[in-house]
Image (cartoon, coloured by chain):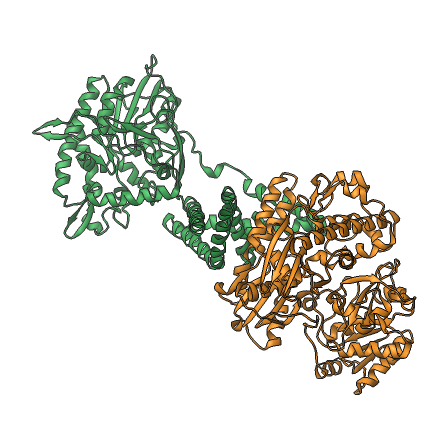
Chain colours: A orange, B green
Amino acid sequence: MYILGLSFFYHDSAAALIRDGVVVAAGEEERFSRVKHDHGFPRKAIEFCLAHEGITVHDLDYVVFYEKPFVKFERILLSTFKTFPQSWKVFRESMLTWLTDKLWVKSLLQEKLGVPARKILFADHHMSHAAASYFCSPFAESAILTVDGAGEWTTSTMGVGRGNRIDIKQELRFPHSIGLLYSAFTAFCGFEVNEGEYKLMGMAPYGKPRYVDKIKEIVQIGDDGSLWHDMRYFAYHYSAESTISPKFIEKFGAPRDPARADVHMDTYYADMAASIQVVTEEILIKMARHLHGMTGSENLCMAGGVALNCVANYKILQQTPFKRIYIQPAAGDDGGAVGAAMWAWNQLLGHEERFVMEHAYLGSEYGDAEIADWLQKKGVHCEEVNDEERCLDRCVDRVTGGQVIGWYSGRFEWGPRALGSRSIVADARRAEMKDIVNAKIKFREAFRPFAPSCLMEKVPEYFDLPDAAAQYPTRFMLYVTQVISDKIPAITHIDGSGRLQGVIREHNPRYHRLIEKFGEATGVACVLNTSFNLKGEPIVETPENAYNTFMRSGMDALIYNNRFIVTKNGK
Amino acid sequence: MHRLLGYLVTCAMLLLIIEGCLRLGGCAPAPAINRFHPTLGWEKEPGAVTEKSTAEFDVTFAINAAGLRGPEVAREKPAGVQRVLFAGDSFTLGYAVDEDDLFLRLFERALQASGHEVEVLNGGTEGYSTDQELLWFEEEGRRFAPDFVVLAPYLNDVYWNTQASYFDKPKPCFTLAGEALARGTAPLADPGRTPWWRAHTAIGNFVQKLSLLRLAGSHTVRIGGRKAFLEDAPVLRAQPPQIEEAWRVTGALLKRFAAAALESGARPLALIIPNRWEIHGDATPPRGLPGFALEDLDAGAPTRRFAELCAQAGFTVIDPSAALAARAAAGERLYFEQDWHWNAAGNRVVAEVLLERFTAPDLLGPGERPLTLPRRTTAASRGGAAWFVVPALIALLLGLLYWRSVKGENPLTAVLKVALLVAFVAGVIFGFQRLMGVLSPAASKGLFWAVVLLLVLFIVWKTARRLGSITELYGSFLRRGHWYLLPLLVVFLSIGMLLVVAASSPFVAPFIYTLF
């Protein structure tokens, strides 16, 4: 049985295909369309999923959309009415998009895919999140916490998963939302909403949490993590342009000029970033504790955009009774595509068989022959090294020699993180690498940290995470832990932390071997890993995308499938 | 349950669309100007004002406090003024023309302009036949103390003079006992108010018309296997026996009318109204006689018969058929094509005939000044450059809005781009109007409905799949207790459907997007 899960029309459109309950292909549309956070209909992602299995839409048993558009429409109507006439502008704009596109998901699917109406299902937004995490987790039972900006009405849920069933027990409703609170401060600190949240998280360690109490004056936090916003300080429920109100500005001062955001580390705003990070962590920890009290489970599945806050994730592990956490690599709305399909398979259709998403390598891949053809057709000079070990040695020589390489190998990663398939790799021992990669390769903000890729078995040598192999979020770069080694300064953030990826041999043998060889050569089994893209662009998908990005950046070499080495000027 | 409600709301939305299309097609209901009357069947309601709109004409009626169409008049005749009271049906009422184009008002103004102290009162009522006109004069008209009473009979009066109802409305009816007219004295039964939806919606108006069409079936006879609507039968060469009997009743009614006029001190005159087929020699017979050939008709027979009966009754007969026929022969169109009443030009000719007769020495005599009819007021003279100014203003406004919403666009280019779009839309609309004007009314009506049909089919084709989603959306809102938002949803979704259609076609898009 084939089920296609889809998420689109908000941000990060995606498609995921499951065959008899197993996720066989998944990808975000942005990878194919080359439009960052593409929110349109994921035509190319769907084509990829179907082509991967060699099937057509007629072979699909169900197509499941990740949320219920009518209920969301209801929320938008009611909330804009409530704030009318302040909300007239957002009302006008949202109605235009809803009336032309978003309301017609069912007919759109019928038209674009040619599937009959009886095959089209709709899952609840937060149920999709919950399913994306729990039904992909290794747990037979688990507490479930979903947290994001807003779904239909819900902004957070607490539930429990047992076998093939998820029960949502409690929920927090719009406009009270951790995600929207975090986004309000993202905008206040000069970053773009739905894009700059991870930048805010990266900025936080540069500041001191001086304004936690002040923030708590505009939000009330319950012992169970429930949240009540004083809406006089926010504008996201009625404004198309701003998430914060004049009263917010009166209290916290003027928002930072976005032009400064990517260049300067303004102390006040860094303190503000640190403060909202602390508040967010406090809310999430309280929620998790309450949820543990409700369920008694030692397992926790998390999902939703806020679950990409890897600093908070690790603190939940440390400061709550939960012993194991599972977060799917695409924890945001893109992951809803997988969740919707899994919800249909397990919960709706009642299948007992469970799937575990052990790794994130679910995207498209290009074989050696395809890459060779493309290189030849484009007249790209490359060195072909048929011996994998020899090729890896050449890569390691370059990295240890201070070069930065583009690493393109196998199926691309599901989710926003590069995990060794479409990565830029550099020497983690060289402190200057952080600035080199930020300035010459990625052309991005100087304060942005880089992540380490470390052999899973060696993680305890470098990070304060003793049982790393048992923690799935380490596979997907979803924990920020303290670095306990001084040998990897390039990936150590200002507060001594690192956003760890533990690499497992069975899941990505080539990448694992690359790090292993680097370790053999240097004594450090960690490399600097950042996503293979330039600032503002999606991660590369095709060999051509990789080549173009390589040529436009300061990278020294590009390695395709550990076989083809492309350099600039033959060096 | 909610699904059912969803279907119901979807149906309501469809009805709204049909209502809009019918209104666009000239089927909008006109507020009724008539009310029930226990003797006459119905009468005009004092103070009523209404607008009537069809594919051929748009007119406004205002009924004065005395229950007459036209300006307010005093019950008491002012000293030194001679009153001319017209009694008749929709021709006299001026069913299809504005007050300024109506023959009796043109007649009045020309007389006044020539120095006559005269007042013309319009006692015409839609659907009246001679019996009602007689009773109205006896009960109401005589109270105005007219010096002249002009009765304006038309061929369809003949049949209805023998009927106790006019389609669905009761009316008085006289019978002949020998030579004497007799009528029941019991008041007529009030048919009750027309249901709201029939009186105020285009769909109701359409249904009403269909219902009248069905009722018309009971007023037909078969002549030689062909169906004849008896109202039109007086033009047939071989008249059915019912019509012969009706002419006898009509003759008696005319005699009584003339006597009543004389008794009240007024001189009776008869303005015989010729029919369209008599004047224009139309290629097709009246709609009520579909199976008959033109050779089967003697279109001038009713006029001749009326003239004869009126003269016998003591009326001074005014027959405008010769004047009308002469003008028609000169190429002037004096009647509407779909409707059978006089248009403004026809009314003007009749006014001229009336003036000529009334200024004869045996009636009013010549005035102090020469007779001149007031200038024609036509829609073409109104509005001036509005056709250019309105689109230009729209283009400017939209262009500025576009400029404000698109970064980096030059303001002049922005306005020019939008102006081109608006010019295209306006060009098509005005061009279509022009084309409609050039074509004959029948062809233009056909073209209009063809375009409407094509548009509806296109919209249905483009949005058919979304109808299911709409039903589900209503169901969702009802299930979740937001029934109060349904009217808003109907409006939004109608707009949404237009946007969807616009987005699907480069030809339709400019029209829809310019609209928004």
Quarter-of-image position of residue A317: bottom right
| Residue A21 percent location from the top left of the image | 58, 70
Q: Residue furthest top?
A: B79
Quarter-of-image position of residue A227: top right
The answer to whether residue B459 shows anywhere in this view is yes
Q: Residue furthest bottom?
A: A386
In the rendered view, tell whether residue B125 sits above or below residue A94: above
In the rendered view, tell whether residue A32 sits above or below residue B381: below
Left or right of residue A385: residue B360: left
Of residues A561 and B330, the one nearer the viewer is A561
Of residues A562 and B330, the one nearer the viewer is A562
| Residue B505 percent location from the top left of the image | 54, 59
In the rendered view, tell whether residue A421 sits above or below residue B421: below
Left or right of residue B355: residue B261: left
Of residues B464 and B79, the one nearer the viewer is B464
| Residue B416 percent location from the top left of the image | 66, 50
| Residue B107 percent location from the top left of the image | 35, 27
Quarter-of-image position of residue B506: bottom right
Q: How many marks?
A: 0
Q: Residue furthest left?
A: B178
The answer to whether residue A147 shows anywhere in this view is no
